[in-house]
Amino acid sequence: MNRTLLFLSIIGTFLFTSCSEKVDLIGNFQETAVVYGLLDQADTLHYIKITRAFIGPGNAVEIAQIDDSSYFDQVDATVTEVLNGVVTRSWQLRDTLVDNKDTIGSFYAPFQKVYYFKTLATSATEAQQISPNPSLTSLHKDAIYRLNISINGGQFEVSGETALVKGLTSTATSQNYMFKFANNPAEYISTGVTASNTGSSFVLNAKLDVEFNEYIGMNKTSKSFNWNIGEINVTPNSSKTFTALGQTFYTLMKSNVTNDPSITRRTFKGIRITFAGGSEELYNYMVVNAPSSSLAQTKPSYTNLSVTNNKKVVGIFSSRQTFSIYKPFFTSAQQAYIRAIDKKSTKELCTGQITGLLLFCSDHPGDNVIGQEEAFACP
């Protein structure tokens, strides 16, 4: 064969057998379950989210807006309670729609399907469903809880188990505990909020829900805002103190009042302290899923769930303990020594440079003693 014929032969072979430029983005998709559930012994209603990773032709952003793309056709799930090696209770999960998903994001919102079970019966029918021990109205702090999920009629199963976080306590339960945010006018101080025992927690969050009232004449509206005062990694059975800054308290009060000129007065109502302690598995999950600081953006994966039939699963089934203490501004005239914030802090709220023009006054019995009323007491 001469060189010309050889060249033409090579070109012809290349033209008819060259690789296609079309790229198959879908490929061999492996079915993946996405499961997220946190049990809390303080709750009697428990939610578990069970969805699927999706893939398909077309625009992925548009597909993410279609809720059916993220749901399995059939989900059968149970949570079983095991105490000292003996099964004591079992719950069949039911599905429901909730409307609390943030609409800012790529996925469908605000409605989403979740699965739930109750440990408190509100009717005779529910009492039968919570058998064999419907009288036990909360999760047992010493039990192990096992999750089993059967997907699409048994095509594959997902399972996991968790103990409960327990033992979280705080010195703020004392009647004499109160917040001190100001010492003298515009002299702001801080108050320590201590978890005296972190229990079996490996990560701890503390927040304050601050409550106050707004009046238009005799009509009262209750208002509140959330103040996150910190989250920190902890070791079990240790103590940790979070700091609530006085100036931040008054600044947040100012930014959360209603902008309504018809309001005639405001009064302080109370503060709820809430600690949330997370398990070691939850801590590990949070660490792995934190934003990467590596230029390569390579990250390991973590889950305490297992899956059958060579499928995949991501997510976590774990626990946390929520411990809450409510400190009212006052309880009664007979207990005037009990107050959520002390007298100097109350005075600063009513007359100070940050909130002094917001019509706050004190209705605390200790500030309204007949003949000895404080200047900042409500008329």
Image (spheres, rainbow, N blue to C red):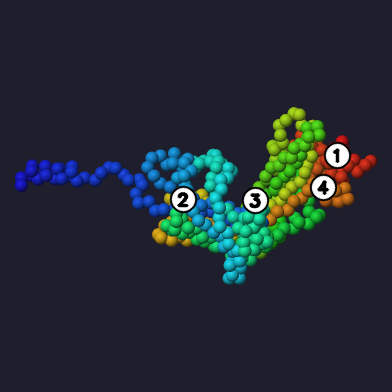
- Give the residue at mark 3: 230
Three-letter amino acid code of the residue under disc 1: Ala
The numbered dot on residue 377 is: 1
Question: In this rendering, does residue 315 appear at all?
Answer: no
Q: CA distance from mark 4 to mark 1?
A: 14 Å
Q: Nearer the viewer, mark 2 or mark 3?
A: 2
Compared to 282, does 211 lie above or below?
above
What residue type is disc 2 on? Phe
- In the image: residue 213, left or right of residue 367: left
The amino acid at mark 4 is Phe
Relative depth, front residue between 323 and 294: 323
Q: Nearer the viewer, mark 2 or mark 1?
A: 2
The residue to which callout 4 is attached is 330
* Alpha-carbon span between mark 1 and mark 3: 33 Å
**Quadrant of the image for the C terminus?**
top right
Task: Indicate which disc residue 72 carries.
Answer: 2
**Cα–Cα span, label 4 and label 2:** 51 Å
Of the pair 290 and 332, the residue shown nearer to us: 332
Does residue 305 appear to the left or right of 319 in the view shown? left
**Picture coordinates of residue 147 (x, y %)?**
53, 60
Q: N-terminal of the two: label 2 or label 3?
A: 2
Image quarter of residue 155: bottom left
